[in-house]
Image (cartoon, coloured by chain):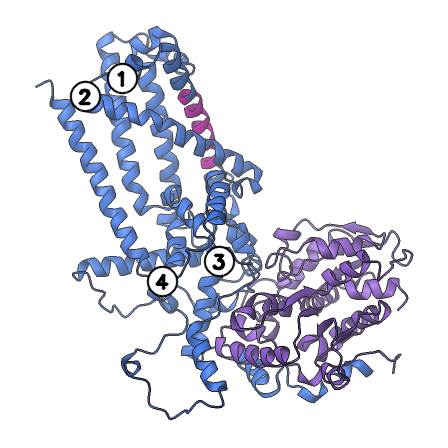
């Protein structure tokens, strides 16, 4: 058991008559996937360190319905969305942050039409805000001069045109940032989007995550930085397939920042 | 008798434009077979997109080589067509180079000189295009959907342009009066010597022939558009205007579903209540799309606008890894099926007679639909704001909500969400366990 994290739930805060400044939407991957849970914990460490007044829904959270929507099940999506919106509105949530670009896109763009209007931030945007408002002081050191390449998640980048926040946060590490040939608007998908995460790929001559890992390897990185739990799975698997796991680590931006703070 | 050429010209002109108008009407009719969508919002932004993307070619030049060459052909095409105005007036009224009697020689020379310069540049550019397609064999022009007509079509357009530009230059080079002005013959003066040994009457015949074939060629090319990917020269403008303005990741929420879900979640709703008056006769909405009529008319406009350049397919992660999905093929299939439906309607007195076929299944396979990662690379790559992803999603909706035909792994995932609120089979009560791990 590792050190205790301070993770208040909305229910607890409400019982105390308090309202958090921001809701941390953990998402299904962040709650259940072993690798993604580490990202969740790293992000919470950052929130604790910066004294952010936040809360989670805990067991009251349920799937956004995003993946059902991408798979074509609009019914299931809207059922999930309306259940979530009921809970979020009951708690009078105004601001949401999440480590999952898919939840980010869904909450930000697809919930308003169903009655859920919130300011939604991706965790890289929120960390950037913490750094800019001096709530988080990044001391360079750990990653000084390290070769880091960033893989753009489709649902943060192309889907929502956010290419700068993750790069701005990475820039504070004083590392050697390397761009892949396909990056930003032309970044190649990791292969998990559109519900592919939950099924085998159709017949082809290669797995998409392998091709994307090859893109990353061309920059000769020490670290592949991601900002999405699904990209994390795909890129980690890709590095394993290429038998590079002893040379290259795949880390979420939240983990990089937490490590740089010795959290 | 001297009016004969003018009358002939008028007949050809009316015939050429008339047939084109007939096909344009068909084009409108076919596009309107699609579902209605409200795109009347944000007019200033839409005009801006059209100006930037279609008029300004902003997305074309993201690939610098083909982008630059395309700008040359595009600018050349638009500006040289000013000359068509003179040709039409000359043809109808029997004048010769009416511009010379209206404009000072130097101005006329400047105009024609510009056209000549552009003509030679266009000639060079289309030759490079031809080499890229047929000699270098750029991958995206040799994918499986680029056989038969689409492959021929691509080359025919280039030949058309080569012939038209050559005719324009030959017409000028063999026009003794024009050459004698020595103004504006910036390129044709170098072609004129080839013909210098020929008698004046022969030169006149060549000049007249070039003139006639040039204008007839333009009219044929105009009418070729409807049958060709080259239709993009017209439709790129409305298509970029009606292009998606919301973030690329935002999929529309189906209203028909919202109504049903609200009813299901409303504790006061009576599930056995008789439908309100009038509602009983309503045909239940079809979820998603299995044929072209189920798609939005913007998707159908997209299909007619596609010029089959393949930038989408060359950036598609599924296609890059050998899967059958090709966003370009999605658009080409949609147009082919729409044409088929249109012909069906023409043949059956304005009504569509079920032909036992549909877009999904007979043109696009489930395998293609399920290979998409919804990454938006195709949408981003398209130089004219086509959105293949929205068609793919509509077909997934049909497969899942009308046919329950999702891959079994996805059915498991969806069952998990229904049962325990996560795509994996974990207990809802364990959602916060990460806190103490």
- What residue sits right under mark 3 in the picture? B326
| Foreground disc of the pair 2, 4 | 4
Q: Are marks 2 and 4 on the same chain?
A: yes
Q: Which residue is mark 4?
A: B36
Q: Quadrant of the C terminus of chain A?
A: bottom right
As helix, strand or loop, the secondary structure at mark 2 comes to: helix
What is the chain identity of the residue bearing mark 2? Answer: B
Q: Earlier in the sequence, mark 3 or mark 4?
A: 4
Cα separation, mark 4 vs mark 1, equals 47 Å
Q: Give me the C-alpha separation between circle 3 and circle 2.
A: 51 Å
Residue of label 1:
B98
What hue does chain A carry in this figure? purple
Q: Chain of mark 4?
A: B
User: What residue sits 30% from the left and 27% below the top?
Assistant: B84
Give, as a single range, the part of the protein colored magenta: B115-131
Q: Identify the disc placed on residue B431.
A: none
Same-subunit check for callouts 3 and 4: yes
Q: Of callouts 2 and 1, which one flags the residue occurring earlier in the amino acid sequence? A: 2
Q: Earlier in the sequence, mark 4 or mark 1?
A: 4
């Amino acid at each position: 058991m590792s050190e205790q994290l301070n993770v208040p739930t909305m229910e607890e805060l409400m019982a105390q008559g308090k309202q958090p400044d921001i809701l941390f939407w953990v998402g299904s991957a962040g709650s259940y996937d072993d690798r993604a849970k580490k990202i969740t914990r790293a992000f919470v460490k950052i929130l604790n360190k910066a004294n952010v007044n936040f809360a989670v829904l805990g067991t009251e959270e349920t799937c956004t319905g995003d993946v059902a929507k991408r798979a074509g099940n609009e019914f299931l999506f809207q059922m999930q969305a309306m259940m979530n919106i009921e809970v979020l509105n009951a708690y009078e949530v105004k601001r949401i942050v999440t480590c999952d670009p898919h939840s980010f896109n869904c909450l930000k763009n697809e919930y308003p039409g169903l009655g859920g209007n919130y300011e939604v931030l991706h965790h890289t945007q929120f960390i950037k805000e913490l750094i800019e408002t001096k709530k988080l002081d990044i001391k360079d050191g750990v990653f000084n001069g390290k070769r880091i390449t960033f893989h753009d998640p489709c649902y943060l980048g192309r889907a929502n045109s956010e290419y700068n926040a993750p790069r701005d946060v990475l820039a504070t590490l004083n590392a050697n940032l390397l761009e892949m040939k396909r990056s930003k608007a032309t970044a190649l998908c990791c292969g998990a989007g559109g519900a592919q995460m939950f099924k085998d790929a159709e017949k082809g001559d290669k797995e998409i995550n392998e091709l994307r890992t090859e893109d990353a390897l061309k920059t000769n990185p020490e670290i592949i930085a991601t900002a999405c739990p699904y990209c994390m799975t795909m890129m980690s698997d890709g590095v394993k397939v290429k038998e590079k796991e002893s040379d290259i680590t795949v880390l979420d931006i939240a983990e990089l920042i937490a490590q740089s703070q010795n959290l | 008798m001297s009016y004969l050429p003018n009358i002939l010209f008028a007949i050809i002109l009316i015939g050429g434009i008339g047939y084109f108008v007939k096909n344009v009407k068909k084009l409108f009719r076919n596009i309107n077979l699609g579902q209605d969508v409200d795109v009347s919002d944000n007019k200033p932004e839409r005009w801006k997109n059209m100006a930037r993307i279609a008029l300004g070619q902003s997305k074309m030049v993201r690939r610098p080589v083909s982008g630059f060459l395309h700008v040359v052909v595009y600018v050349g095409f638009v500006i040289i067509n000013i000359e068509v105005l003179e040709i039409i007036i000359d043809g109808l009224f029997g004048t010769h180079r009416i511009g010379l009697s209206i404009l000072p020689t130097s101005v006329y020379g400047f105009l024609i000189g510009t056209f000549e310069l552009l003509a030679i540049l266009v000639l060079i550019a289309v030759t490079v295009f031809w080499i890229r397609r047929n000699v270098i064999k750029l991958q995206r022009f040799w994918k499986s959907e680029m056989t038969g007509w689409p492959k021929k079509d691509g080359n025919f357009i280039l030949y058309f342009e080569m012939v038209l530009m050559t005719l324009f230059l030959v017409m000028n080079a063999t026009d003794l009066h024009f050459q004698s002005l020595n103004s504006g013959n910036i390129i044709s003066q170098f072609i004129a010597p080839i013909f210098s040994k020929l008698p004046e009457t022969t030169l006149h015949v060549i000049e007249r022939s070039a003139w006639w074939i040039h204008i007839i060629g333009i009219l044929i090319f105009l009418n070729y558009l409807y049958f060709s990917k080259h239709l993009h020269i017209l439709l790129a403008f409305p298509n970029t205007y009606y292009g998606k303005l919301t973030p690329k990741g935002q999929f529309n929420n189906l209203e028909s579903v919202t109504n049903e879900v609200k009813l299901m979640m409303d504790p006061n709703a009576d599930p056995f209540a008789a439908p309100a008056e009038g509602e009983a006769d309503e045909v239940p909405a079809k979820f998603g799309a299995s044929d072209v009529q189920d798609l939005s008319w913007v998707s159908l406009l997209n299909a007619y606008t596609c010029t089959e350049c393949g930038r989408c397919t060359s950036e598609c992660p599924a296609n890059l890894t050998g899967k059958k999905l090709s966003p370009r093929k999605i658009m080409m299939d949609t147009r082919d099926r729409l044409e088929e439906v249109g012909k069906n309607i023409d043949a059956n007195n304005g009504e569509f007679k079920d032909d036992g076929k549909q877009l999904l299944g007979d043109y696009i396979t489930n395998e293609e639909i399920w290979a998409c990662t919804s990454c938006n690379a195709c949408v981003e790559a398209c130089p004219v704001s086509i959105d293949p992803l929205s068609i793919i999603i509509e077909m997934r909706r049909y497969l899942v909500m009308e046919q329950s035909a999702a891959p079994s792994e996805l059915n498991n995932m969806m069952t998990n969400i229904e049962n325990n609120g996560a795509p994996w089979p974990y207990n809802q009560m364990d959602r916060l366990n990460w806190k103490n791990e």
